[in-house]
Amino acid sequence: MRTIFTTPAFNKMSRDFLQKNPILKAKWAKTIRTLEKDVFHSALKTHKLHGNLKELYACRISYDHRIIFSFDEKSITLYGVGSHDNIY
């Protein structure tokens, strides 16, 4: 299992995201727990990003909501969370 780290930007985006989408709080938490166990779990639909974000990955919270992150063998760093249109 990898250790989860968050950036200050992710923390702010998470607060805003959860205030606007309280119904997704459980899914948000479940996504982070699943990500911690297996970054390529099929439910997450993890994919590598392109362009300016080419060093990062994204996974799915819901159909339209994503978490942006990077990872190595021991850790995962969370950078952003939001709707598909706003996060990219």
Image: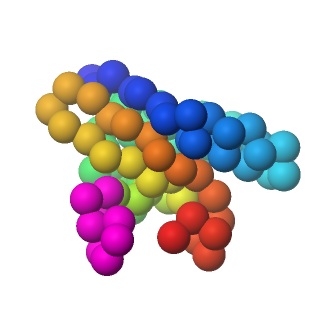
Whether 47 is drawn above or below 43: the answer is: below
Q: Is residue 4 left or right of residue 71?
A: right
Quadrant housing the N terminus:
top left
- Residue 29 within the magenta-colored segment of the rendering: no
Residue 88: percent from left, percent from top: 51, 70
31 left or right of 18 in image: left
Residue at 31% across, 46% down? 70
* Residue 48 higher or lower than 17, as above or below: below
All told, the count of numbered labels is 0
Is 45 placed above or below 20 here? below
Residue at horizontal 25 percent and vertical 59 percent from the top: 55
Find the magenta span and give its range. Answer: 46-56
User: Does the segment drawn in magenta span residue 47?
Assistant: yes
Q: Residue furthest left?
A: 73
| Visible residue check, residue 18 | yes
Q: Is residue 63 visible?
A: no
Residue 5, quarter of picture: top left
Identified at 26% across, 41% down, the residue is: 71
The picture places residue 82, in percent across and down from the top left corner, at 63, 58
Tell me the quarter of the picture where residue 2 sits. Answer: top left
17 to 8, vertically: above or below: below
Colouring style = rainbow
Q: Using residue 84 as the reference point, say whether residue 45 is left or right of it.
A: left
Q: In the picture, residue 15 is in which quadrant? A: top right
Q: Position of residue 6 (x, y in %)?
A: 48, 32
Q: Which residue lies at the image location 33% right of the left edge and 22% below the top edge?
A: 3
